[in-house]
Image (spheres, grey):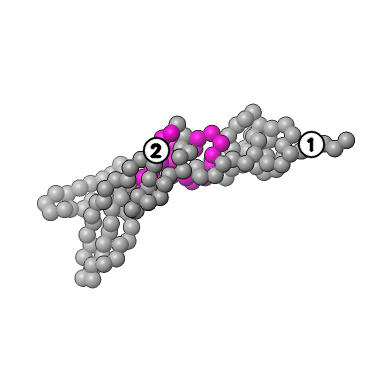
C-alpha cells in the first residue's frame, strides 16, 4: 500500500453504503493505492486546535490574526497574521520599523508604506543615524 496524501476540496467517496461529500473544507484523509490498483479513502480524526498535518504532528505558529486557529491540514493562517508577523504560516517576525508602527507585508516582510524615521533597508531593519 502507498499513502498518497490529504484529500482535496470537494472529494466524494463511499464507506459501505454511505456516501460522504466535503465541499467547503479540506479534510485530512489517506488515499491508498492497493497492489490491484483499487483506491480507498479513509478519514482520519481532525487535528486539535494549534496542530496540523497528516498525523497532526506539526504545531501551528501561534501567530494567526485574532488568535484564530490555523488550518488543520496546511498550517496556514486563513485570516492572516497577527501584527508583527509574516509568512505562509505567520512563522516569521517582522524585522523592521515600519512607518506609523504599521505591520510588515504579510507575504514577504517588507514595509510597504516605507520606514519610520531613522530606519532604512527593504525591511527597515537598518538604523540610519546621520554622523556629525
Q: Which residues are magenta?
A: 67-89
The answer to which image quadrant residue 5 occupies is bottom left
> Is residue 35 toward the left or the right of residue 107 in the image?
left
Q: Residues within 10 Å of mark 1 (few under 14, many from 20)?
A: few
| Magenta run includes residue 71 | yes
Structural distance between the alpha carbons of marks 2 and 1: 41 Å
* The furthest residue to the right: 132
* Residue 129, numbered label: 1
Of helix, strand and loop, which mostly describes the magenta segment?
loop
- Residue 63 in the image, given as x and y percentages of width and height: 48, 38
Q: Which residue is mark 2?
A: 69
Above or below, 41 against 109 in this view is: below
Please name the residue shown 74% across and 34% down the image: 118
Dot placed on the residue nearer the N-terminal end, 2 or 1: 2
The answer to which image quadrant residue 76 occupies is top left
Quadrant of the image containing the N terminus: bottom left
> Is residue 10 toward the left or the right of residue 99 in the image?
left
* The furthest residue to the bottom: 35
Amino acid at each position: 500500500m502507498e499513502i498518497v496524501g490529504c484529500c482535496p476540496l470537494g472529494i466524494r467517496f463511499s464507506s459501505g453504503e454511505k456516501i460522504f461529500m466535503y465541499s467547503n473544507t479540506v479534510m485530512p484523509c489517506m488515499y491508498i493505492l492497493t497492489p490491484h490498483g483499487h483506491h480507498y479513502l479513509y478519514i482520519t480524526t481532525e487535528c486539535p486546535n494549534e496542530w496540523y498535518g497528516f498525523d497532526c504532528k506539526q504545531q501551528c505558529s501561534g501567530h494567526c490574526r485574532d488568535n484564530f486557529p490555523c488550518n488543520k491540514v496546511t498550517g496556514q493562517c486563513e485570516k492572516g497574521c497577527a501584527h508583527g508577523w509574516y509568512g505562509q504560516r505567520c512563522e516569521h517576525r517582522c524585522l523592521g520599523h515600519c512607518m506609523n508602527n504599521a505591520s510588515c507585508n504579510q507575504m514577504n516582510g517588507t514595509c510597504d508604506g516605507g520606514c519610520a524615521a531613522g530606519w532604512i533597508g527593504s525591511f527597515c531593519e537598518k538604523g540610519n543615524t546621520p554622523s556629525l
